[in-house]
């Protein structure tokens, strides 16, 4: 029996999934019989997850796990090799197997992923395994200048049309929105987020703003239009820059907003305000000192800054599948790690706000729109792409609702700046 | 000449100051003549401070320093040994020499201290010297259980009557107040601080609150009276506990507030809220893991916590004189260091607010009242005590206005708690 498993690694796989992601009954018949060892592996996986509220259904229909317990979902494993890969590196392989349909989830995908996050957080065995795997096998990619371009191209240059199908329709904000009223639409919440950022930065007409990582440029245009500032926005995604420039021209803002296709490390000039929303996750820990130097170099004596980033309650590597397949080089820092940006030049942290549940809600809005446009997206790409992105969006919701990920907005200034407001009430005058 | 200096260290000092702090002209006449070496030392000190906007006046009336420059103050050095001690360890000895009147400051004391802070922050020579001195010579005292009692007794058991002369008259808050309107009285601002803390903690009737380090118990009484909660407050200062209990009885709150004369490390029971205002500075870095354990043990699953503490923009030891003479064992942490409390049990930081300039204003209010009661305080203690406390209050103002010290309020909860408000607007409804 063990010999069979060894052999399976070298012989071509029988995958009971058709190219369109449907189950292939013909191939399924040719799979090895479910054995005692297969059952043992499935139970081992559940055991490593601390007996979670879901079961595994093997390729012969046999269900493994406590059926008496409340069951959120059934995880269908369609072939024996998929089972082995899950044991080897569940965090990485689950995503790949799910994407191609070799693993399926019957039931609520988000609920299942939340249960998996909660279980893995409390299960020490799994945690140890995960720690070893993440640190030995899944070092995030480096973000040297050339690598950064490749990593960012991987994700952001898929096509603007794709993101237009499910992001907010006004400002194309691919970052956490702000829901002071939780029933806001995604458009309202992204506008509220941009205003929240602008108020935190106390923008006033004539301020010179530099933005590191501008996405499709929505925040820069919002600042220029509503706060009378000029903005230099840096981004290394070619498609995003083209889109941003076109929009600025169309809206008559081309004299107020300059989109620079260049790396944040090449920012030059003096600015009253430094802002970066959703870039730090891609910067990588090794580059925080360089980022600190850039901010120190460009910020005026009474300048203000804001960094908005996904984060952690304590240092941990990104989920291996997300880092490998979705966001190469991504690393969400803990507040402790973010201090590598603020301490070297004695920047003073004025305000930290954790918007964790706002990101879960943002992702729910995105997923709902994604699902509405699923058929269209499948024609643009393929079934595996749709399944991978659904898993990524659903898994991100789960990561934020279970507390695995945080969203920090950090406001800072130079340590010697005494031009500070006496309260944060000005952030809330309109709410 | 150098031999004379060596000798001076072993022979009894000629100190030109009388017991009441006045200048003693008789002794002054017996002092050594001002020499080239004395002038060199005075210039060296100014040089180490990066040519600050003040001068030294030696015991013969001779002024050293650039008189052409804008001059905030003249620092009078009344004897040669005082000059030598300043060179040896300015941060430690200035305070001692000033207290006994061997060094004086003509001009605005706060302004002079601000200039000294600013100069020493930017002067690399002084900075290097200070770093070596603080790390080699001035390790803060340990805070084991017995030491903590001695350290706290040193400062807080001077006598309640003393603090009543210059703290706010309602709640005896010996911590940073909150001035959403900068013209508030100290009583208004301390009330605003307590309400700000209570709102951040989202207190609701019936909540069980535990307080680590309660001073004279004002916050606990405020919470019980205005928010309908019960409070267990821990403190190891015997005099403060007696005062707090008496006030609670007088105000009919003895069934809502329990003052426990014990160390925070012995907190037991389960609580909805953990709060600590102005204790962390005395806890010491080595004990953050124990504090974290205490919070983890006592906080309910959806419990909230707030820590209010003096801090730093980057790690640095307390001013040597303050640590030795005023606050033994004190250490204001950087945000990075505070993460030692939050990370081990995956507490989630929800909100950080830096109230730095609020502490400068608080201290200004305290110093004004202290000065009004100077004569009274001198009869209770002595001249050196008055001078030492004035220097401590004035120096603390300077430390906050120049950005050497920060004031952090950190709100946190367990990483798995999703019972979170959608915005911080509820903090500002009444402002």
Image: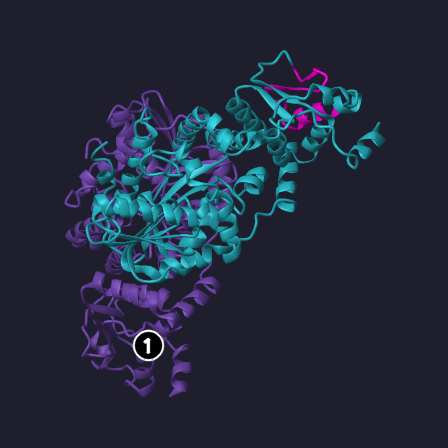
Chain colours: A cyan, B purple
Q: Quadrant of the C terminus of chain A?
A: top left
Residue B71, horizontal then vertical, whole percent: 19, 72
- Magenta-drawn segment: A40-66
As rendered, which of A411 and A279 lies closer to the eye? Answer: A279
Position of A160 relative to B40 (above/below): above
What residue sits 69% from the left and 29% below the top? A82
Q: Quadrant of the N terminus of chain A?
A: top right
User: Can residue B118 be seen by looking at this rendering?
Assistant: yes
| Residue named by callout 1 | B47
Check disc 1 and report its element: helix, strand or loop.
Answer: helix
Q: What chain does mark 1 sit on?
A: B
Number of numbered labels in the structure image: 1
Q: Is residue A52 magenta?
A: yes
What residue sits 59% from the left and 31% below the top? A99
Residue B368, horizontal then vertical, whole percent: 17, 52
Position of A262 relative to A279 (above/below): below
């Amino acid at each position: 029996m063990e010999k069979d498993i060894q052999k399976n690694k070298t012989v071509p796989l029988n995958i009971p999934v058709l190219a369109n992601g449907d189950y292939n009954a013909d191939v399924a018949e040719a799979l090895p019989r479910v054995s005692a060892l297969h059952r043992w592996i499935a139970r081992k996986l559940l055991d490593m997850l601390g007996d979670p509220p879901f079961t595994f259904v093997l390729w012969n229909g046999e269900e493994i796990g406590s059926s008496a317990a409340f069951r959120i979902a059934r995880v269908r494993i369609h072939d024996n090799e998929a089972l082995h890969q899950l044991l080897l590196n569940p965090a990485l392989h689950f995503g790949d197997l799910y994407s191609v349909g070799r693993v399926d989830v019957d039931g609520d995908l988000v609920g299942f992923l939340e249960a998996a996050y909660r279980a893995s957080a409390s299960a020490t065995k799994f945690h140890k395994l995960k720690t070893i795997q993440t640190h030995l096998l899944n070092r995030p990619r480096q973000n040297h200048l050339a690598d950064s371009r490749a990593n960012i191209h991987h994700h952001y240059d898929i096509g603007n049309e794709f993101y237009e199908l499910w992001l907010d329709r006004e400002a194309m904000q691919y970052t956490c929105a702000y829901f002071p009223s939780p029933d806001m639409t995604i458009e309202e919440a992204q506008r509220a987020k941009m205003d929240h950022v602008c108020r935190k930065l106390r923008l006033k007409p004539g301020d010179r703003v530099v933005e590191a990582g501008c996405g499709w440029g929505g925040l820069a245009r919002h600042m220029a239009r509503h706060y009378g500032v000029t903005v230099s926005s840096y981004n290394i995604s070619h498609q995003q820059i083209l889109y941003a420039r076109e929009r600025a021209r169309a809206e008559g803002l081309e004299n107020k907003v300059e989109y620079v296709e260049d790396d944040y490390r090449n920012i030059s000039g003096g600015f009253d305000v430094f802002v970066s929303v959703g870039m730090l996750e891609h910067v990588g820990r090794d580059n925080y000192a360089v980022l600190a130097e850039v901010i120190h170099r460009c910020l005026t004596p009474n300048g203000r800054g804001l960094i908005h980033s996904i984060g952690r309650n304590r240092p941990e590597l990104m989920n291996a599948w997300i880092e490998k397949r979705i966001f190469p080089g991504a690393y969400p820092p803990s507040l402790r790690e973010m201090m590598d940006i603020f301490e070297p030049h004695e920047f003073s942290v004025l305000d930290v706000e954790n918007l964790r549940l706002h990101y879960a809600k943002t992702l729910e809005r995105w997923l709902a729109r994604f699902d509405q446009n699923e058929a269209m997206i499948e024609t643009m790409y393929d079934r595996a792409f749709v399944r991978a992105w659904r898993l990524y969006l659903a898994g991100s919701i789960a990561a934020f609702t279970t507390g695995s990920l945080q969203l920090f907005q950090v406001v800072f200034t130079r340590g010697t700046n005494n031009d500070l407001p006496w309260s944060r009430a000005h952030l809330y005058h309109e709410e």
